[in-house]
Image (cartoon, helix red, strand yellow):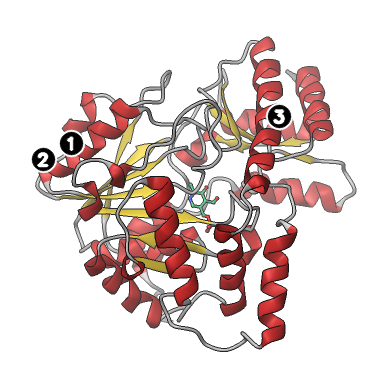
Amino acid sequence: MKPLSAKIGAVAPSATIAISDKAKKMQREGIDVISLSIGEPDFDTPRHIKDACIDALNRGETHYAPSNGIPELLSAISEKINRDNHVPCTPQQVIVACGAKDAIYEAMEAVLNPGDETILLTPAWVSYEPCVQIAGGTVVKHAVNQKSFQLDDSILERVNAKTKMIVVNSPSNPSGAVFDKSSINLVADLCQDNDIYAMSDEIYETLVYGKEHISLASLGNMAERTITINGFSKSYAMTGWRLGYAVAPVGIIKAMSKVQQHSISQATTFAMWGGVAALRGDQRCVEEMRKEFDRRRKYIIAELNRMGYQTAPADGAFYAFVKVAGDDMEIANRWLEKAHVAVTPGSAFDAPGWLRLSYAASMDRLKEAISRIRRVG
Ligand SMILES: Cc1ncc(COP(=O)(O)O)c(C=O)c1O
């Protein structure tokens, strides 16, 4: 038989799979495993959003829609981006995709040529590197400061004539860090001085705790070279709806649109009506979920620190990022086997020596997880 795609063969399997498969096997065997490895809100999608989708289904919104998205959602997104993110945006600068992940993939395909370098700031979310690779680009990794989780001038050493794009993810999965103005400004200057595109993944923008979220595209002339990624999964607890979007200059949107037209065609028509309700409806649900995450965050960080663990500044998203002494894969394994608590090893995010604990679990489960971890150490 002829060999399969070398490009896909080069993509590494996720470092999280072994642990999560083991956790699932234990659960199937009837063991009460507490999963702190999940990257999704444990809340239900708010009622008014579900109702808007059900109404759309009942109205017969069950057919193909314009590939880039229904006009109502494109308008709602462009209004939100102007209003909340202070980024100039018309509906022509928006594309709705099947989740932020799909928008990220399409953007990489649209921008990168073989050999083009993309700077990833580590620790980095697991899918950026494979998306760059599948698009034919080359990944250049740069570790952020491991105490402040901010950027400094050393990032400039990663830039050369082949650098095409930099990916920024603030608030960050996995570290929970939120870039302050100086880090964001550094990225903006670097892009503008060296003619580099930026991808700003702002999927966790509403989950910040006492810190300001700054949209990269709102700075200087950055809107002309930034692809802003966002979606509904985290802010509105809509992970299963597979609804996300990108905002970018029209040329990039047109290129992404070609990828979309010949792959997924469009996001699901009735799901997009849920997206309209999410953006145009009452935003109190977003604040209620944020407050609950904040309560859990304070609890888990305080407990981990009391146990002597150093944690990254947990200013955003819903992750505690914990420094461990020793091999993170081995410790994650031990916690799973001995404490029946599933966490994600930092190695999955190019951050060996760290563990990611998601606090998207109920307070009772978090309390139980902490007491089990305390027992096994
Ligand atoms: C940083 C980051 N970007 C993008 C995504 C993808 O989100 P979506 O569910 O909209 O595809 C995730 C989901 O875990 C994420 O953590």
Residue 103: name its quadrant.
bottom left
- Given contact means CB atoms under 8 Å apart, are the residues at marks 2 and 1 in contact? yes
Q: Quadrant of the image for the N terminus?
A: bottom left
Residue 371: name its quadrant.
top right
Query: Is 35 situated above or below 376?
Result: below
Q: Position of residue 27 (x, y in %)?
A: 83, 49
What amino acid is labelled 2 in the image?
Answer: Asp
What amino acid is labelled 3 in the image?
Answer: Arg
Q: Secondary structure at mark 1?
A: helix
Q: Which one is nearer the viewer's eye here, 7 or 224?
A: 224
Q: Position of residue 74 (x, y in %)?
A: 43, 69
Count residues near mark 1 (Cα–Cα under 10 Å), then give few for <14, some for 14-19, many for 20+.
Answer: some
304 vs 370, left or right, is left
Q: Secondary structure at mark 3?
A: helix
| First in sequence: mark 3 vs mark 1 | 1
Q: Which residue is mark 2?
A: 193
Q: Which residue is mark 1?
A: 189
Q: Residue at x 77, y 18 (%)?
A: 374
Q: Which residue is mark 3?
A: 296
- Given contact means CB atoms under 8 Å apart, are the residues at marks 2 and 3 in contact? no
Q: Residue at x 29, y 54 (%)?
A: 88
Q: Secondary structure at mark 2?
A: helix
Q: Which one is nearer the viewer's eye here, 245 or 161?
A: 245
Q: Quadrant of the image for the C terminus?
A: top right
Q: Residue at x 32, y 70 (%)?
A: 92
Query: Is 168 situated above or below 240?
Result: above
Give the alpha-carbon distance from disc 2 to disc 1, as whole Å. Answer: 6 Å
Q: Residue at x 69, y 81 (%)?
A: 57
Count residues near mark 2 (Cα–Cα under 10 Å), then give few for <14, some for 14-19, many for 20+.
Answer: few
What amino acid is labelled 1 in the image?
Answer: Asp
Q: Position of residue 256 (x, y in %)?
A: 32, 70
